[in-house]
Amino acid sequence: MRVRPAVLVLRIAASLVLVAAITFICFRVIPVNATTAGFAYLLGILAIAATWGLIESSIASVAAMLCFNFFFLPPVGMFTIADPQNWVALFAFLATALVASHLSDREKKQAEEAKGRQRETEQLYALSRAILLTDPSQSVGSQAARHISEIFDCPGVALYDAKTSEVFRGGPDDLLDIEGKLKQVAVQGNNFVEPPLFVAAILLGGKPIGSLALKGSSLSDGALQALLNLVAIALERVRTEEAANRADAARQSEEFKSTLLDAIAHEFKTPLTSIKAASTSLLSDSPALSPQFRELVAIIDEETDRMNQLVTEAVRMSQIDAGKIRLERESLDVAALLARVVEHFEPLAAGRPLRVNASPNLPRVSADAELLSLALRQLIDNALKYSPPGSPIGVVADLEGDRVVIRVHDRGPGIPQRERERIFDKFYRRGSGKDRVPGTGLGLYIAREILRTHGGDLWIEGEPGEGSEFCAGLPVPKEGRTK
C-alpha cells in the first residue's frame, strides 16, 4: 500500500526517536556493554520493520549504526574506531540490521497480500452468490453494478451490455461521461487505464460482449479478471434464460397452433366429407347428367380432394413443429403399401404411366402405415406435378444395407445442387415452377419429417436436366436383417 509523504515523515521521525531512546537507556539509565546494546538496537529495528516498513527500518538501521559507533565502540564519543576488529563488528551489525529489516518487511507484505487475497476471495464469493440470487423481475445489469459497488467498496461502477447497448450504473459516482469509453473498449477489446478510472472489456469465449468501468478500485489483476468472468457469466445467464423463455413461448405457441388447427381441421373435415360424398354420388349414380354439369361436379370433386389435402398438410405440419407426432408402428409389407399408394394416383396420372418395381423378398419395416403412406403420396404427387405430359414415373424399392430405400424418379427438369437442401424447407418453392405448378411448399417438408421420425431420411439424387430422384430410406428392424 502506498503511504502518504506526511505519514512517512512522521514514521521516520518516530523511528529515530526509538533509536535515541534505546541509546539513552543503554548508555545512561542502564549502562550495558556493546554486545547488549547491539542486540537492543536489532530488536528495535525489527519492531520498526514489522510495524511500518523497509524505508523506516533502513533509516533506523543507519542511525543505530552511527549511535553504536559513537556511544559504544572505543574511542567512545567519536566516529572513529580504534580496534580494526570493531570495523568488522560494526558492518556486521549494519548488515544484520538491514537484512533483518528486509526479511521482516517482506514477511509483513506477504501477510498483507494474503489478507488481501482472502478479502478479495470473500468479496468474489459474495458477488457470485448475489448474482445467483438476482431478482429476475429486475434488470440483472443494474443489480450486478449495484452489487459490485457495495461489495468491493467502489464509489463508481458502470456496466455496458454490447447486445442491448445499455449502460448500468452503481455507486454514488454516476460516471456520466463514460458511455463512449465503454463502447470503445467493448468494440476494441483493449483495457483503458487512467487512475482512478479503469475500464476493462468483458470477454466470453474470447469475444467481447461488453465492458466494465471501475472508479477508485484497488483490486489485484487476478481478482479483477475473476470479477470480469463473473459479470460475463451473469450476462450470458440472462441471455440463456431469455432464449429458454423464448423457446418455451414458441413451444407453447406451436402446441396452441397444433390444437387450434386440429379443431379447425375437424370442423373442415365434416363438410368436406359431405361434399365429397355428394360429388362422388352424382358422378357415379347420375349417368344422365349433361356434359357441362358433369364437368362442374368433377371440378367440385377434385377441389374437395385438394382442400382435404391442404387441411391434412396444415395439421401434420403443426404436429411436427410441436413435436406431437405419435407413431402407431406396425409390421408393413413395403410392396403392398406401394401398391395401395400408387393405386390412389392412377386416376390423377393424366396419362403418365406409374411403374412400380419392388425387389422380391424385401424385409418388412416397422412404421406407421398412415404417416408413411402420406409421405409417399407427397413424393409421387410432387413427381406428377413436375413431370412432362406422357413421361413415366418410376417407383423402385430395394434393400440397401440395413435399410429399405424407396426411390421416386421423374423426368422433370431436375433440381440444382445448391437447392437440394432448401427444397425441404417449409413453404420453399423453386422460382422456375412456383407460378405454373400449384402447391403450398409443405409436402416435401412433411415427408422428410415423417421419415426422420421413423429413424430414416429423405434425400435427392439424379443430375440436373435428367429428372429428380427422391430417395426415402427406412431402417430395417434387427430381426428382419439378413444374417
Image (cartoon, rainbow, N blue to C red):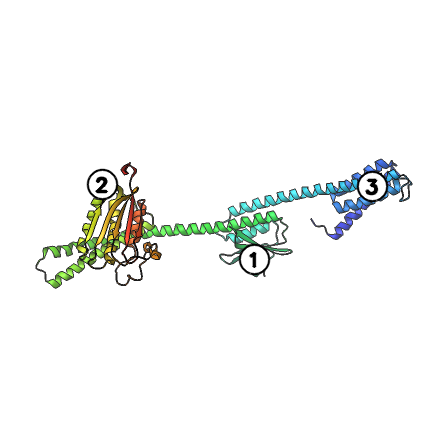
Residue type for callout 3:
Phe
User: Mark 3 sits on what residue?
Assistant: 91
Closer to the camera, 257 or 113? 113
Q: Position of residue 418 (x, y in %)?
A: 35, 57
Mark closest to the chain's N terminus, 3 or 2: 3
Identify the mark at residue 185; answer none if there is no mark.
1
Closer to the camera, 327 or 245? 327
* Residue at position x 17%, y 57% in the image: 351
Q: Quadrant of residue 304?
A: bottom left
Helix, strand or loop at label 2? It is loop
3D distance between C-alphas at marks 3 and 2: 107 Å
Residue type for callout 2:
Asn
Mark 1, other Cα within 10 Å: few <14 / some 14–19 / many ≥20: many
Q: Position of residue 219 (x, y in %)?
A: 62, 49
Identify the mark at residue 361; answer none if there is no mark.
2
Left or right: where 1 falls relative to 329: right
3D distance between C-alphas at marks 2 and 1: 70 Å
Total tally of numbered discs in the picture: 3
Left or right: where 221 falls relative to 372: right
Q: Position of residue 312 (x, y in %)?
A: 26, 52
Mark closest to the chain's N terminus, 3 or 1: 3
Whether residue 203 can be seen here: yes
Helix, strand or loop at label 3? It is helix
Q: Quadrant of residue 475?
A: top left
Closer to the camera, 417 or 30? 417
Mark 2, other Cα within 10 Å: few <14 / some 14–19 / many ≥20: few
Residue type for callout 1:
Val
Q: Single out the residue that lies furthest toward the left.
A: 288
